[in-house]
Amino acid sequence: MHEVRGGRPNTPKVRQRKRGIRRNQGGYTTPYGRMFRGPAEKILASSLLRQYHGQIQLIFTSPPFPLLRKKRYGNLQGDAYKKWLASFVEVFRSLLTPDGSIVMEVGNPWELGRPVMSTLALEALLEFLKKGNFNLCQQFICYNPARLPAPAEWVNVQRVRVKDSYTHVWWMSPTEQPKADNRRVLKNYSEAMLKLLKSQTYSSGQRPSEYRIGARSFLRDHNGAIPPNVLTLSNTRSRESYQLFCRARKLPIHPARMPAGLAEFFIKFLTTPKNLVLDPFAGSNTTGFVAESLKRRWLAIEPSKEYVEGSLGRFLI
């Protein structure tokens, strides 16, 4: 039985109408965004996105990783992967605002049958940067302390490597000064820093590193600490709305879901409300959901009908 509120059954269709969600051409729209169903190469080159040229503030995505084993969501290897990723350069540049950014999360590939890391991800990044004449603004690390030990053969069986527990996140832009403000992503002060701010006493002066710290500037309250470029984010929740929605409808759960905190950090850092965010490899549409919650407009592209259908759960539950 469906839940009843105010005398009306609270069915998925009713919830869609109430929340301004409409289906169209295999995808759907929300008050702030639109999901397109189809290959990124085809959708990006179509008239559907022509109206957005020069308007996208942030392209935030986690493209299929160059993994050894084929995944359901599709992934390439070797030179094919490098050429595939570089093929998006021209359309990405045309979509971005002059001060826009591209942020990509890329995992660590390994050589097939060998306990040796592959340089493919780095080679693909360099080719992408060179072809697009992009600036590499900063490298980030997304560390997942709860990640399962991998690669299994070398970590679990032969015990000759430690587990691979992070991904690279690359921030790029066509300009040296993209729109960004770290005051939008400040962290809570530590207990030690709160005590210093309260006491207003600090041993200033030159450190062994020859860096000189002035007490006056150090003891100013900026409403939070500047975060590092190492982001610690777990992705272990098994009862989030997306997974509950998929299980109830027997839809496949995307195997490479992005931590919502990763999308939240960069959307806050590099955009402001009503800016436009694009994820061309949306998967379960974490990017679109986080953008919606932060009142950013968004566009997402995903070729799998089942993954598009499942991603609706993020907006309905």
Image (tube, helix red, strand yellow):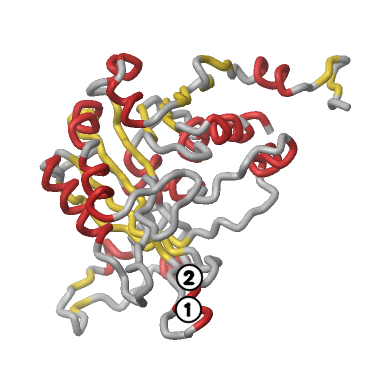
Residue at coordinates 38% horizontally, 68% vertically from top-left? 200
Q: Nearer the viewer, residue 253 or 54?
A: 253
Q: Quadrant of the N terminus?
A: top right
Q: Where does residue 132 sit, x and y in percent of width and height?
A: 14, 40
- Secondary structure, mark 1, is helix
Q: Where does residue 143 sit, x and y in percent of width and height?
A: 44, 64
Q: Earlier in the sequence, mark 1 or mark 2?
A: 2
From the image, tell me which residue sits under label 1.
155
Q: Where does residue 225 sit, x and y in percent of width and height?
A: 39, 59
Tags 1 and 2 touching, CB below 8 Å: yes
Residue at coordinates 46% horizontally, 22% vertically from top-left? 34
- For residue 41, side relative to residue 3 (left or right): left
Q: Label 1 crowding class (10 Å Cα cut-off): few <14, some 14-19, many 20+?
A: some
Q: Which numbered disc covers residue 150? A: 2
Q: Quadrant of residue 202?
A: bottom left
Residue at coordinates 66% horizontally, 29% vertically from top-left? 316
Cα separation between marks 1 and 2: 6 Å
- For residue 127, side relative to residue 78 (left or right): left
Q: Amino acid at mark 1?
A: Val
Q: Quadrant of the C terminus?
A: top right
Q: Nearer the viewer, residue 6 or 244?
A: 244
- Secondary structure, mark 2, is loop
Question: Residue placed farthest to the front in the image?
Answer: 113
- For residue 12, side relative to residue 129 (left or right): right
Q: Amino acid at mark 2?
A: Ala
Q: Label 2 crowding class (10 Å Cα cut-off): few <14, some 14-19, many 20+?
A: some
Q: Quadrant of residue 251?
A: top right
149 up-or-down from 90: above or below: below
Q: Where does residue 47 sit, x and y in percent of width and height?
A: 30, 14
68 up-or-down from 135: above or below: below
